[in-house]
Amino acid sequence: MAKRYDAIIIGTGQAGPSLAARLSAAGQSVAVVERGRFGGTCVNTGCIPTKTLVASAAAAETVRRASQFGVVAPPPTVDMKAVKARKDMISGESSASVEKSVRGLANGTAIPVGRRFLASSIAARSSSASLVWPSFASWAANCIATEKNRCSSRSTNEATSAFS
Ligand SMILES: Cc1cc2nc3c(=O)[nH]c(=O)nc-3n(C[C@H](O)[C@H](O)[C@H](O)COP(=O)(O)OP(=O)(O)OC[C@H]3O[C@@H](n4cnc5c(N)ncnc54)[C@H](O)[C@@H]3O)c2cc1C
C-alpha cells in the first residue's frame, strides 16, 4: 500500500533539509528524496570542496613566500593526492552530517533513489502530499508559518507544472 506524506521534499541541497526540519517540527510527516549525494552541490562539488582546494593552495603559497616573513623553508611540494584526500574527507563529513540530520527527523523519512528516479512517479503515488522542488523550497519555508494551507496548494501546483 502506498505511504502518504504531508510533504515530499525533492533534493537535499541548501534549502531542503532545513525546510524538512521545520515541517517535521510543525508535526507534518515529511519524505525527503535525494537522487545523488546528500547535501547537494555546495557540500559535494561546490562551495565546500572548492574552499578546501583554495585553502591548500593558500598554504603552499605562504610556504613559497616564507622568506618574505623571515622564515627559512624549502620550496613547497604539493601532494595532490593528499590535497584531494583532505577535500574528500571534509566534503564527505558534511554530506554525512546532512544525511544524519535528515534521517533523524522526528516525523521524517529519507528516501535515497537512483539516477532514474522520476519526480512525477512519487507525485502520482502520493497525490495528497505537497511536493516541494528545491527551487521553491526557500519560498515555501518562509510561508509555512503564515499561510500553511495556501502554501501547500501553491507548492503542489508549481511542482506539477515543473514536471510537465
Ligand atoms: C564550483 C562551485 C562553487 C560554489 N561556491 C559557492 C560558494 O562559495 N558560496 C555559495 O554561496 N555558493 C556557491 N556555489 C553555489 C551553490 O553550490 C549553489 O547555489 C547551491 O548549492 C544551490 O543549492 P540548491 O539547493 O538550490 O541546489 P543543489 O545544491 O544542487 O541541490 C539540489 C539537490 O536536489 C537533488 N535532486 C535534483 N533533482 C532531483 C530528483 N529529480 N530527484 C531526487 N533528487 C533530486 C540533487 O541531487 C541535489 O542534491 C558554488 C557552486 C559551484 C558549482
Image (cartoon, grey):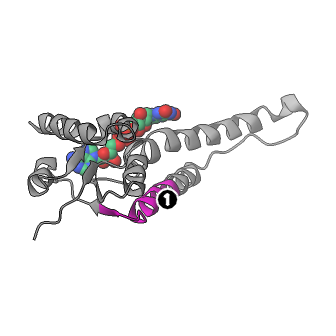
Residue bearing mark 1 = 97
Residue 151 is left or right of residue 13, and the answer is left
* Residue under the point 50% across and 54% down: 94
Secondary structure of the residue carrying tag 1 is helix
Q: Tell me where residue 106 appears, x and y as whole percent.
A: 40, 65
Q: Quadrant of ligand 1?
A: top left
Magenta stretch encompasses residue 162? no
Q: Which amino acid, mark 1?
A: Ser
Name the image quarter holding residue 114.
bottom left
Query: Cβ of disc 1 within 8 Å of ligand 1?
Result: no
* Residue under the point 19% across and 39% down: 153
Find the residue positioned furthest to the bottom.
1
Specify the segment rendered in magenta.
92-110
Image quadrant where one finds the C terminus: top left
Name the image quarter holding residue 151.
top left
Q: Tell me where residue 35 appears, x and y as whole percent.
A: 26, 53
Q: Nearer the viewer, residue 98 or 41?
A: 98
Question: How many numbered marks, from 0 up?
Answer: 1
Residue 44 is left or right of residue 57, and the answer is left
Q: Tell me where residue 146 appears, x and y as whole percent.
A: 37, 37
Find the residue positioned furthest to the right.
70
Q: Nearer the viewer, residue 143 or 49?
A: 143
Q: Main secondary structure of the magenta part?
A: helix
* Residue under the point 45% across and 56% down: 98
Q: Tell me where residue 69 appears, x and y as whole percent.
A: 87, 31
Q: Nearer the viewer, residue 150 or 77?
A: 150
Decide: is 34 above or below 70: below
Image quadrant where one finds the N terminus: bottom left
Q: Nearer the viewer, residue 10 or 5?
A: 5
